[in-house]
Image: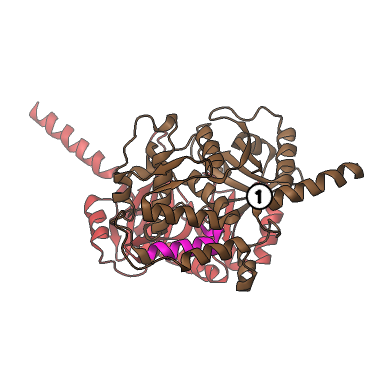
Chain colours: A red, B brown
Amino acid sequence: MKKRQFYTCLLIMYLGISCSPSRKSEAYFRENKTAIAELRTYFNQLYTQQPFSAGFTDKTFKYYVMQVMTDTLRAVYNNEKRKDELWENVRKFHYDTALLKKMAKRMKDIKCLWIGKSDYYFGEHQEKFDYISFKSADKAFRENKYYMLVFLEHRLEYPEFQERIDKGTFVPVDSLVYYTTTSRYR
Amino acid sequence: MRRFESLILPYCWLTFFLLTNKPICLAQDDQNQLNNYSALNPAQQRALDLLAKIDTVTKPPLWPHIQPALFFANIRKNILYPAKINQGQNTNFCSYAALTHLLVRYQPDNYTEMILALYKTGQVSLYSKRVIKASQRVRNGAGLLSDNGELNLLHADQLWFLTMADNFRGYLNLFDHKYKIGDENTLWAATNYKKFNRMLREFGGYKVHAIGADLLRPWKKKGNLYKYMVNQLDTGLVMMYINGKLMYPHKFTPFTLPSPTHFVVLYELKEINKMIKIKYWDYGLKTEQLITWKRFKKTIYGVSSITGR
């Protein structure tokens, strides 16, 4: 009887650990480390041409969206309804189409849902970061259902940031790479 | 038809002039206005003159956490770049930001007078003669928002949005009346459609014609709704109450709750190859995208048109 209880506890602990999102994110990052680095290189090269973010809108990675930002405008293009319009605008903003295709292929390979840049304010300091979201938990009523990797530009020493790490909002997975969950994938 | 146009066009221009207080085109970008500083319209000049006369250094006794330098820099930026007004991240301030965007764009002098009165005395008289007061809790909270992106540094917007949310209450705010830090993202700050239209009337003195409701979409067929909105755009300003999630559709969740979530200012609506090109303002930028007729019908819950003052 005691043996049975012991094995049940062991099984529960195993399931708890294997299903934990931080383990999943860490495993995802380790498995795709090179591909993620390449993806970020492509993205940052294209971003210097004109700021944008991009990603997929379905689980089969067939439909994609590109959101191009200018000083006054946020233009959203997708290939689901108007493919021509998307490519017209890619040309209009002088993006390197070969590089863009490479980036899209790399995203599809590693099942990355979205890539973009964002920022966070600590007091008066603005800290920019890249992020990729890569998986949605298949649980309909879960609030934070998208896994996200955050890539910092440099080490952050703010107490507020350390507080978030202590609380588990940001979990370090590598040097300058953190994992988090969010309610939105983009 | 020509006779109709000759009658209606002068009326449109008159209405437009009265609304905007300036004879320039609606579609003109803020940036273009600023290429030449003298191109600022008279209302903007008056607003900047008001700022020039005020003490911008002394800490305000009523607002212990507002920093004067950040406060005045924020007002100046709003006057010069009304399209850049941003509700911040993780907030329910979209209705207040949309209203402020309109107010600053078309009545920057009135906006400046109002926000300076609030800063100096903790209360302000609106166009409707109603006096709104900043509660002690709001006065202590303004300047302390810390998890809201750029809004952390925009002390004038913090003071303004918090005071608006604290004074205008709708049924969504029934259970959360007293502000505490963190309420920016809760029902305390939420806005229902009736409350939004009331704010439009009281702040700007606008005549508002509204169709739609909180849970029921406007009772018009999609073609008619489109024509109605285009007509309203031709004669005045249009705001939409939409389901924001449907503007960015994806297939990662099985369903999207059919309810409105967001207020935006409409700038352009055009039919292109059986789709609708829509341009609207929110989060400090104009967004341009193509949507299907079906999505157009499903997304829009309310259309508020300003037809005069």
The residue lying toward the viewer, choosing from B46 and A159, is B46
Q: Which residues are magenta?
A: B70-85
Quarter of the image with the N terminus of chain A is top left
- Vertical order, A124 against B190 (above or below): below
The residue lying toward the viewer, choosing from B40 and A7, is B40
The residue lying toward the viewer, choosing from A172 and B133, is B133
* Residue B81 located within the stretch drawn in magenta: yes
The residue shown at (45%, 67%) is: B53
Label 1 marks which chain's residue?
A: B
- Vertical order, A114 against B165 (above or below): below
Percent x, y for residue B49?
52, 66
What secondary structure prevails in the magenta region? Answer: helix
Q: Is residue A42 left or right of residue B11?
A: left
Determine which residue is flagged by label 1. Answer: B19
**Number of callouts:** 1
The residue shown at (35%, 68%) is: B57
Percent x, y for residue B42?
62, 63
| Res. B91 in view | no
Percent x, y for residue A126?
38, 65
- Vertical order, B172 against B287 (above or below): above
Q: Secondary structure at mark 1?
A: helix
Percent x, y for residue B240?
60, 41
Residue closest to the far left: A2
Q: Is residue B24 left or right of residue B249?
A: right
